Image (cartoon, rainbow, N blue to C red):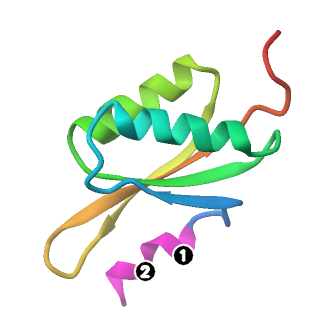
Amino acid sequence: MNSTSKIENLKSPDAQLDLRGTPCPINFVRTKLRLEQMTAGSVLEVWLDAGEPIEQVPDSLKMEGYQILQTQFVAGEDNSGFFAMQVQRPEQEAA
C-alpha cells in the first residue's frame, strides 16, 4: 500500500494550486484570486502546509462564502507532508 498516493482518493478537481511554502495571508489571497478566475461550481484543490496555513486559509475562505469540500493530509516519504484541500466556488455569487 502506497501512502503517498492518498490524493488519488479525492474527487477530481477542476484546477490545482500548490501553495506549500507560501506564508499567510499570501496563500489565502492567491487561493481567492484563483477561485475568482474559475467558473461557478468549479472545484480548486489547494496544497497547504501544516500549522498556520491549514488553520487560517479554510476559515478565511468560509467567511468569503466558499465551501470546503474536503481536507486530507498527504504524507510524504520523508515524514513530511501537506494538506490537500478542495474548495468549491459557489454556484451563484451572493448579491
Residue 26 placed where, x, y %?
Answer: 36, 36
Residue 9 vs residue 37, the one in the foreground: 37
Q: Callout 1 environment at 10 Å: few (<14), some (14 to 19), or many (20+)?
A: few
Position of 15 compared to 76: left or right? right
Label 2 – label 1 distance at C-alpha: 6 Å
Disc 1 marks which residue? 8
Which residue, as the protein is rendered here, is positioned at the far top?
95
Which residue, as the protein is rendered here, is positioned at the far bottom?
1
Quadrant of image for the C terminus: top right
**Element on which disc 1 rests:** helix
Task: Tell me which segment is drawn in magenta.
Answer: 1-9
Q: Residue at x 20, y 41 (%)?
A: 51
**Element on which disc 2 rests:** helix
Q: Amino acid at mark 2?
A: Ser
Disc 2 marks which residue? 5
By secondary structure, the bulk of the magenta-drawn segment is best described as helix
Which residue, as the protein is rendered here, is positioned at the far left?
79
Q: Are marks 2 and 1 in contact (CB under 8 Å)?
A: yes
Quadrant of image for the N terminus: bottom left
Q: Which mark is residue 85?
A: none
Q: Is residue 24 visible?
A: yes
Compared with 59, 22 (above or below) is: below
Residue 6 placed where, x, y %?
Answer: 44, 73
Residue 83 placed where, x, y %?
Answer: 36, 55
Residue 73 placed where, x, y %?
Answer: 35, 59
Position of 48 compared to 35: left or right? left
Question: Is 2 part of what is drawn in magenta?
Answer: yes
Position of 75 compared to 44: left or right? left
Q: Callout 2 environment at 10 Å: few (<14), some (14 to 19), or many (20+)?
A: few
